[in-house]
Image (cartoon, rainbow, N blue to C red):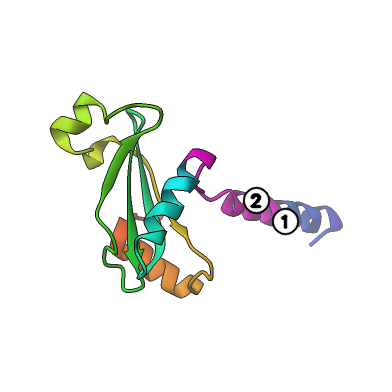
Amino acid sequence: MTYRETAMTKKKKKAAKKVKNRALVAEKNEEAMVEGILEGSPDGIGVVIVRLECGCKKMAAVARDGEPASKLIMYRDQAESICDKCKKDNGDFMRVTEAFIHWSKPEPSDQEKEAINAKVLGTMPVIH
């Protein structure tokens, strides 16, 4: 391998790492909700955040075994209630734009995170 090929490979690895580090995280306006949900859920080790295309959000605490640790909360930022569509279909999964788990400290191991993610959010096929 030439020096140039080696340098290109290193750049690709660095770029891939950056993409992985850009994982979904709770926005500032969601953090207060997350803290409130975790405070009321002693078994919670994280909060599932589901963002819908209409702007509404669904959140619930998740326990170490991947089971719910709180009731599901639906809300919309800076609004008195959720949208009419969500009132009708409870935030159908077909309208989900992003879904992830915001982990509380101390975070579980990567292996535990993967297992909980798979149980809570399901799995997707990897396209090569």
SS category of the residue bearing label 1: helix
Q: Residue at x 60, y 49 (%)?
A: 19
Please indicate whether residue 119 sits to the left or right of residue 37 in the image: left
Disc marking residue 9: 1
How many numbered discs, if any?
2
Q: Is residue 117 magenta?
A: no
Answer with left or right where residue 113 lies relative to residue 90.
right
Q: Is residue 26 magenta?
A: yes
Dot 1 or dot 2, earlier in sequence: 1
| x then y, percent, for residue 94 | 24, 38
Residue at 50 percent of width and 71 percent of height: 110
Identify whether 73 is placed above or below 13.
above
Amino acid type, residue under disc 1 in the picture: Thr
Instruction: Give the crowd class for mark 2: few <14, some 14-19, many >=20 residues within 10 Å.
Output: few
Disc 2 marks a residue whose amino acid type is Lys
Which one is in front, 1 or 111? 111
Residue 26, placed above or below residue 47: above
Q: Which residue is mark 2?
A: 18
Task: Single out the residue that lies furthest toward the right.
Answer: 3
**Residue 49 appears at what percent x and percent y?**
38, 48
Tag 1: Cα neighbours inside 10 Å, few (<14), some, or many (≥20)? Answer: few
Q: Is residue 7 above or below residue 55?
A: below
For the N terminus, the image quarter is bottom right
Relative image position of residue 113 (x, y in whole percent): 43, 68
Relative to the observer, which residue lies in front, 110 or 51?
A: 51
Disc 2, SS: helix
In front here: 125 or 46?
Answer: 46
Write the start and end of the magenta stretch as one range: 12-29
For the point 53% across and 51% down, which residue is it?
23
Q: Residue at x 79, y 59 (%)?
A: 6
Q: Is residue 6 left or right of residue 89?
A: right
The percent coordinates of residue 76 (x first, y second) are 34, 32
